[in-house]
Image (tube, grey):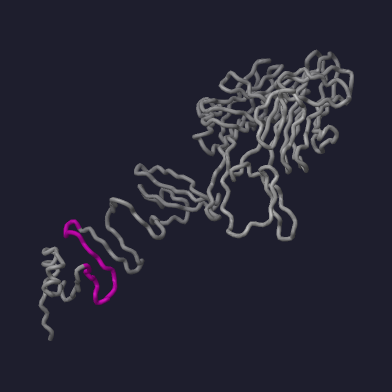
């Protein structure tokens, strides 16, 4: 039988110094188990019996640090406070790791988790506060190396019931009872109280749009516009149509506006007769134009490539060339747009010879476009090769009584070539002076050479009436895509 002389573990802990036992070369026991020591190490479970290994603090306090053999992790039985940096080599997670979105049943108060929203393929950081409410933040997409999510701020409001005009020749604010989209309320928001307003919370360029359908039991004229701060008509927002009884007339418009934080915009409409209405599903929205962050590409030698302005294309392995992509400068994909208006009006369209609409006001002109508005030129030069999205709207006024006009507008390239498709027609029968009509069209156009120019031209297919353009109600919007 081997006799052992040593210090019991409780006595050693009272001594509180490994150096004493080590200097005396006295082993330390707890029961029959020896704890080998040197100056820097105290070994628990020296005989490798396995199982959980527990270091307990206090009999009554009973706080523990446990090595859990089955899970292979250390567990603290209470909160852990760290002073200084916490360096983690590996994943930092919280349990339970939710297989579905954290909710009231699978998530405790003061707990957080990073989880994958498989429907939208987005990573979300979600936390439940001590009061039981949730906060969350999208932190990236679910695929791609180093990819980030950068949604354009957008808002869309919708009216789900008819809008009735109780009085004639009065502009009414259209109010909306639904909010379809609201991606970033720090930038764009549908006002929950004054439900006819969209709130602008950040300076910048915005793409504004509306869509509705007009109906009446009698012949009538409908006029629609967008106003900022109940005081200023936004250029390019005006739409007018002279319609016949019992017809459903679709009305839509898309235009560019520069707005400031603190502004609000409102959709307004008026009718020449009362008792008529806009049918349900009227929509009003805005998009703030911002840069988008792309995903990181794979490493490797770049293929053959060509530049045209800020547009780039690459050669495919079979020798063919890919599509042009506009990088917008600075390595980021940005919007490259222009919008011009015809603010003075009274340009005559009174014969069968195409008349080029002149533009004397620039709302925006990016690098893909050149136009001399000082000379009121009709010619807009396209500085880059590639595809363009073009929208135009031309409102005219019939100056004759009991006469009709059929106005045809289209896009013309370099003074002679008609672009197909780009046609629009507006039929206007005037029972009295100054009845109005609007030509509008939107289409894609491929520009094949630098410095081609385009114009909007209009003519009368039926001559004999005096038709004039309306100031601030004629515009063109171009986007290099």
Extreme residue toward the bottom, this view: 1
Q: On the rendered structure, is 55 left or right of 246?
A: left
The quarter of the image holding the N terminus is bottom left
Residue 29 versus residue 354 in the image, above or below: below
Residue 210 in sight here: no
Position of 229 relative to 61 (above/below): above
Residue 99, position as x, y percentages in the image: 47, 56
Look at 28% across and 50% down and name the residue there: 83
Assign the C terminus to one quadrant of the image.
Answer: top right
Viewer-closest of 305 and 79: 305
On screen, residue 261 versus residue 226, left or right, reads left
Magenta-drawn stretch contains 58 = yes
**Is residue 224 in sight in this rendering?**
yes
**x and y, in percent, of residue 389 in the image:** 71, 38
Main SS category, magenta section: loop
Q: Position of residue 339 (x, y in %)?
A: 68, 30
Name which quarter of the figure residue 35 lies in.
Answer: bottom left
- The stretch of residues the image draws in magenta is 40-61
Question: Is residue 163 inside the magenta stretch?
Answer: no
Q: Residue at x 69, y 55 (%)?
A: 304
Total labels: the figure holds 0
Q: Nearer the viewer, residue 243 or 252?
A: 252
Viewer-nearest residue: 449 or 479: 449
Horizontally, residue 351 falls left or right of residue 336, namely right
Q: Is residue 52 above or below residue 269?
A: below
């Amino acid at each position: 039988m081997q006799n052992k002389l040593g210090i019991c573990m409780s006595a050693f802990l009272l001594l509180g110094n490994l150096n004493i036992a080590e200097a005396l070369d006295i082993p330390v026991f707890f029961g029959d188990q020896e704890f080998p020591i040197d100056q820097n190490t105290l070994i628990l479970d020296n005989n490798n019996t396995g199982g959980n290994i527990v270091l307990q603090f206090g009999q009554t306090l009973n706080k523990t640090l446990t090595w859990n053999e089955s899970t292979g992790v250390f567990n603290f039985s209470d909160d852990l406070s760290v002073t200084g940096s916490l360096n983690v080599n590996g994943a930092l997670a919280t349990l339970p790791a939710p297989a579905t979105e954290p909710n009231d049943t699978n998530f405790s108060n003061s707990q957080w988790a990073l989880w994958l929203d498989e429907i939208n393929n987005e990573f979300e950081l979600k936390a439940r506060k001590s009061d039981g409410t949730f906060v969350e933040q999208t932190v990236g997409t679910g695929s791609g190396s180093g990819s980030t999510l950068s949604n354009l701020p957008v808002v869309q409001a919708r009216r789900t019931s008819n809008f009735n005009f109780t009085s004639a020749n009065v502009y009414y604010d259209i109010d909306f009872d639904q909010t379809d989209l609201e991606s970033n309320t720090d930038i764009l928001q549908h006002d929950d109280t004054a439900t006819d307003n969209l709130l602008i919370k950040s300076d910048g360029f915005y793409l504004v749009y509306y869509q509705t359908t007009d109906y009446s039991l009698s012949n009538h004229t409908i006029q629609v516009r967008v106003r900022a701060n109940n005081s200023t008509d936004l250029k390019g927002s005006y739409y007018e149509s002279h319609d016949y009884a019992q017809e459903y007339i679709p009305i839509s418009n898309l235009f560019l506006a520069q707005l400031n934080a603190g502004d609000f915009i409102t959709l307004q409409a008026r009718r020449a007769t009362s008792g008529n209405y806009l049918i349900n599903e009227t929509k009003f929205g805005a998009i703030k134009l911002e840069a988008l962050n792309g995903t990181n590409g794979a490493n490797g030698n770049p293929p053959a490539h060509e530049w045209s302005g800020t547009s780039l294309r690459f050669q495919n392995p079979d020798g063919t060339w890919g599509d042009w992509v506009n990088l917008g400068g600075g390595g980021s994909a940005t919007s490259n747009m222009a919008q011009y208006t015809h603010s003075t009006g009274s340009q005559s369209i009174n014969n069968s010879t195409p008349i080029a609409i002149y533009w004397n006001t620039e709302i925006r002109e990016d690098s893909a476009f050149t136009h001399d508005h000082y000379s009121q030129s009709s010619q807009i030069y396209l500085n880059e090769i590639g595809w363009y999205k073009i929208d135009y709207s031309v409102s005219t006024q019939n100056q004759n009584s009991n006469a009709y006009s059929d106005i045809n507008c289209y896009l013309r390239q370099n003074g002679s070539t008609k672009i197909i498709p780009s046609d629009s027609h507006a039929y206007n029968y005037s029972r009295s002076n100054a009845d109005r009509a609007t030509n509008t069209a939107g289409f894609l156009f491929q520009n094949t050479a630098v410095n081609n120019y385009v114009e909007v031209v209009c003519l009368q297919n039926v001559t004999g009436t005096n038709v004039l353009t309306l100031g601030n109600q004629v515009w063109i919007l171009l986007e290099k895509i």
